[in-house]
Structures are given as C-alpha cells and as structure tokens.
Image (cartoon, rainbow, N blue to C red):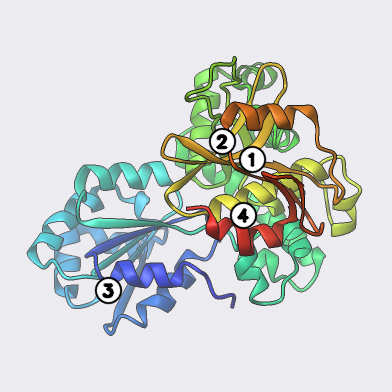
Amino acid sequence: MISRSSQKELLYLLKHFPAVSVLGSRQVGKTTLVKEIAKKLGKKAVYFDLEKASDRAKFYDIHALLSPLSDKCVIIDEAQELPELFTALRPLIDEKRTAGRFVLLGSASPHIIKGISESLAGRIAHLEIGPINFREAQSKNITYKKLWFRGGYPQALLAKTDILWHYWAENYYRSFIERDVNFLMKESLSPTIVKNLWKMLSGINGNILNHDDLARSLGLSRPTIYKYLDFMEGAFLIRRLQPWFINVSKRIVKSPKLYFRDNGVLHYLNGIHSANDLAGSIHSGASWESFVVEQITQLKHPFIEAYYYRTHHGAEADLILVKGTTPVVCIEIKLSNAPEIKKGWYEVKKDLKTKKNFIITPQSDEYRVSDDTIVCSLQRFLEKHLKEIK
C-alpha cells in the first residue's frame, strides 16, 4: 500500500472536529485511507456503505441507529446517497460534541457539500483526496513515467502489467462513467452519446472549453452539457481551470481550460495502451500538461490558487499561481527537455509582473534563461521551488 500524504492532515482534523468529510473520485483510496487512520484514534470504528442495500436499510431511523455509537468513530461511505443524513447528524453532534465522531466519505462533491453547508456548518471539516501524486509515488520508487501513463488510482498504478491496467481502466469507464453517472445525475443520456462526449473531452484535454461546440456536436442542449460537466467536475474526474484576468487591461480569453484529473483515464479514452504508445502519440503534449497541472494543484500551498492566462493575441502561460489578488509565479509546461521560449512568454511576464517564473519539462537540468525565469524538471520544481511559493 502506498502511504498517502493526506494521512497526517486527516488525523489532525479528526482530533479537532466532531465530523470530517473526505471527498474524492471513486476508487481513489478514500475508504482504505480512512479505515487506516481510524485505528490511530484510540476508539473503535464502525463502517457503513450507503451503496449497499443492507447498510442503507439500517438508516431507516438514523437517530436510533447512531445514538448508541457516540463513543465510536462512525464512517459513512458514499454519504451523498442519503441527503437526509446531514440534517440528522446535527443534533447528534450537538448532543455530544467530541472529536472524531463521524467521517463522511463522498464521491460527488456538489451533493455532499450542499447537504453539509445547509446542515453541518461549523461542525465539520473538509479534506479532498486526489489520485496518488508524484511525491507519494516516489516514496515507493514508482517513476514519474509510470505515474504519468497509468494515472494515480491505486489499483491501476499498482497493476502488475499494462494489460491489467487496461482492464481496470475499461471497467472503471464502463461501470462508473458510462452507467452510474446517468443514474446519479438523474439523466438518461444514451451510452453512445456518453461515449461520444467523453471521446470529445479526451480530444480537447488541455484546450479552451467551448460548451456551445460540445452541445452542437452532440445534439444536446447547452444546459445539459453544463449539468454534465458540473457533475463530472464535482465527481473529481475533470478540472476546469479558470483564466486569470483581474487587474489586466488587455483583452483576455475568459473561458476555462479543460483537464482530466487522472491521466490513466485520459489515456484509456485516447487508445493509448503503453508508455511507448504515449511517447509517440499526438496527445502526449496535452497529456503531459494535464499531468503537471494536476501535480502542482495537488501539492501547492493551500493559500495559493491556480489559473491560466491567455490574451486574444496569443500570449499565454499554462499555469499562474496567485496569492490573494497578486500573481506570484508564471509557469509554462513543455514536453521537450530543450524547450523553445516564444515571444508570448515575455509578454505574459510583463503583463503580470511576476518575479519568479518557470518552464517545466520532464527531465531537463535546471538552468536560468533570464534573471526571473528558470527551466527545470517537474521533480525539481515539486521538491524545491513549489515549497517556497507560499
């Protein structure tokens, strides 16, 4: 098992809050992590999975079920399946406000956050668990190439062969993305439309998102496209990276860029079956970009926000790290270890007035191309430079 960097933070929250919500996509390792941490709390844990009919039936009378468990850590998986749960937990917490009473696991963020914000405000802390990241993989001597190709879902990353990885990805797509999402969204999109939508999304990974083009190509309404993408972002499958345009006088692109949160799913959808396939794929550049964006957004300081920047004249930075309302770092992501620096890069730095800037590659040595710009590998950036950006 790969040790997750969230362990320490989760344990800290459970020792200080009566309830903690742990959010992340399905199969990302939330349940394994929570059960492991619960052992360190010094009290017995009781586990319920609300996707199991037998467990769900026990919640017919929530108060009667949970009141006798006040001295235990109650773990409730897929908590968004029972919206009335959140209202019922409030009086239970208020009756005995001790730390670590409830852990709510969820894989559909908007559903669970809505219930929490309406019922458990001030009583609960939140923690998001992403796919296995670069630092976690490195602790088990897993190379960045393997993590980049297979993605960070534990079973996929640790599969003994690429064939087993492919079977896992195929099952994940068919059982969750293709079927369960319709059910959870209360929609009835045909499997063909869902498949075509995901094929289109995998083809535009790393590009500006045009909701109207998607709707027109699929014969769906614009609200349906928005609803689907909102849900998939809330299910931690995609990221819509927003543009930075505050305090900028130029005409700026204001549509989000689309990224897959996990490259393994992206590669499955693009028919990439091995690291060799990835190296020769037309999708490799955009795939590397999405991989770097995910690593940095997972591992950055929580006070730092991530955006991208693009003017209508084409000057662009793939990632802007912002503190408050001040851009502090511009980042360009390149697949080449001998990156070419274009004129637009200098325009971006001038527009945003950032004093630290980086061009991130897979394996290049670190060197300066100007007083304020460093070329370095992703590993070097994560291990040294990102820690200094606070």
Q: Earlier in the sequence, mark 1 or mark 3?
A: 3
Q: Which mark is residue 295?
A: 4
Q: Residue at x 70, y 51 (%)?
A: 263
Q: Earlier in the sequence, mark 2 or mark 4?
A: 2
Secondary element under disc 4, as helix, strand or loop, is helix
Residue tagged by mark 2? 240
Q: Is residue 122 left or right of residue 354?
A: left
Identify which residue, 371 or 119, lies in the foreground: 371
- For the residues labelled 2 and 1, the Cα–Cα distance comes to 6 Å
> Label 1 is placed on what type of residue?
Tyr
Q: Where, by quadrant of the figure, is residue 352 drawn?
A: top right
Q: Residues within 10 Å of mark 2 (few under 14, many from 20)?
A: some
Q: Position of residue 15 (x, y in %)?
A: 27, 72
Quadrant for residue 126, please give it.
Answer: bottom left
Q: State the mark number for residue 307.
A: none
Rendered image: mark on residue 259: 1
Helix or strand or loop: what does disc 3 sit on?
strand
User: In the image shown, does 294 or 322 lie closer to the viewer?
Assistant: 322
Relative to the observer, which residue lies in front, 189 or 389? Answer: 389
